Image (cartoon, helix red, strand yellow):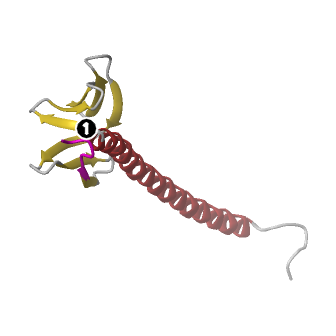
C-alpha cells in the first residue's frame, strides 16, 4: 500500500521529463511561427515598396508630354515644363524634379525597365527581391494623356 505523504522520486522525474518535452515542442512551434512571420513581413515590405514606386511612376507617366529613357534614368517632361527624373541608384529609386533634391520612392528594387511605344504607351517593369529570397515583379502599361 502506498503512503499518502508525498510523491516518490520516479513520479517527480516522469513529470519533469514530460514538462521538458512539452516546453521543447512549444519552443519549436514558437520559433517556426516567428520565422514565418518574418518571411511574411519581408514579402509584404517588398511588395509595398514596388507598389509605392509604381504608383509614383504611373502618375508622372500619365501626365507627361514626353519620356526620355537612358541607361541612368527615366525623365518625364510634364505639361508645365518640369522635368521629373527617376534613377535606380543601387537598389533605391530616387525621384527628383528639375534637378532638385532627390526623394526615395522605392527601396530594395533590383531592376527598373521602361519602354515607350510610338503611340505614347509607357510600359513600366519593376522587380524586387525580399530578404527571404523571393522575387516580386510589377509590370504595367500607362497611356500618356498629355502627349500631342
Q: Nearer the viewer, residue 12 or 130?
A: 130
**Within-10-Å neighbours for mark 1: few <14, some 14–19, many 20+:** many
On whether residue 8 falls in the magenta region, the answer is: no
Left or right: residue 87 compared with residue 39: left
Q: Which residues are magenta?
A: 142-148
In the displayed image of the protein, which residue is found farthest to the bottom?
Answer: 1
Q: Tell me the residue that label 1 is attached to.
A: 64
Residue 46 is at least partly visible in this image? yes
In the displayed image of the protein, which residue is found farthest to the top?
Answer: 100
Could you say where residue 58 lies in the image, as x and y percent from the top left? 31, 45
Q: Residue 146 appears in which quarter of the rendering?
A: top left
Which quadrant is home to the C terminus? top left
Left or right: residue 70 compared with residue 142: left
Could you say where residue 86 lies in the image, as x and y percent from the top left? 24, 31
Residue at 31%, 22% in the rendered image: 102
Residue at 33%, 50% in the rendered image: 132
Residue at 26%, 25% in the rendered image: 81
Secondary structure of the residue carrying numbered label 1:
strand
In the displayed image of the protein, which residue is found farthest to the front?
Answer: 148
Could you say where residue 68 lies in the image, as x and y percent from the top left? 13, 34
Which quadrant is home to the N terminus? bottom right
Could you say where residue 98 lies in the image, as x and y percent from the top left? 27, 19
Q: Nearer the viewer, residue 127 or 10?
A: 127
On whether residue 146 falls in the magenta region, the answer is: yes
Residue 90 is at least partly visible in this image? no
Please tell me whether residue 63 is drawn above or below residue 120 in the rendered image: above
Q: How many marks?
A: 1
Left or right: residue 73 compared with residue 107: left
Amino acid at each position: 500500500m502506498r503512503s499518502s505523504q508525498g510523491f516518490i522520486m520516479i513520479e517527480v522525474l516522469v513529470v519533469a521529463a514530460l514538462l521538458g518535452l512539452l516546453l521543447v515542442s512549444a519552443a519549436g512551434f514558437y520559433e517556426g511561427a516567428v520565422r514565418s512571420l518574418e518571411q511574411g513581413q519581408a514579402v509584404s515590405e517588398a511588395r509595398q515598396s514596388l507598389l509605392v514606386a509604381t504608383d509614383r511612376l504611373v502618375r508622372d507617366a500619365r501626365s507627361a508630354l514626353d519620356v526620355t529613357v537612358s541607361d541612368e534614368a527615366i525623365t518625364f517632361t510634364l505639361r508645365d515644363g518640369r522635368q521629373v527624373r527617376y534613377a535606380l541608384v543601387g537598389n533605391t529609386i530616387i525621384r527628383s524634379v528639375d534637378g532638385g533634391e532627390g526623394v526615395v520612392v522605392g527601396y530594395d528594387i533590383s531592376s527598373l525597365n521602361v519602354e515607350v511605344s510610338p503611340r505614347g504607351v509607357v510600359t513600366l517593369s519593376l522587380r524586387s527581391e525580399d530578404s527571404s529570397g523571393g522575387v516580386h515583379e510589377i509590370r504595367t502599361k500607362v497611356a500618356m494623356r498629355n502627349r500631342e
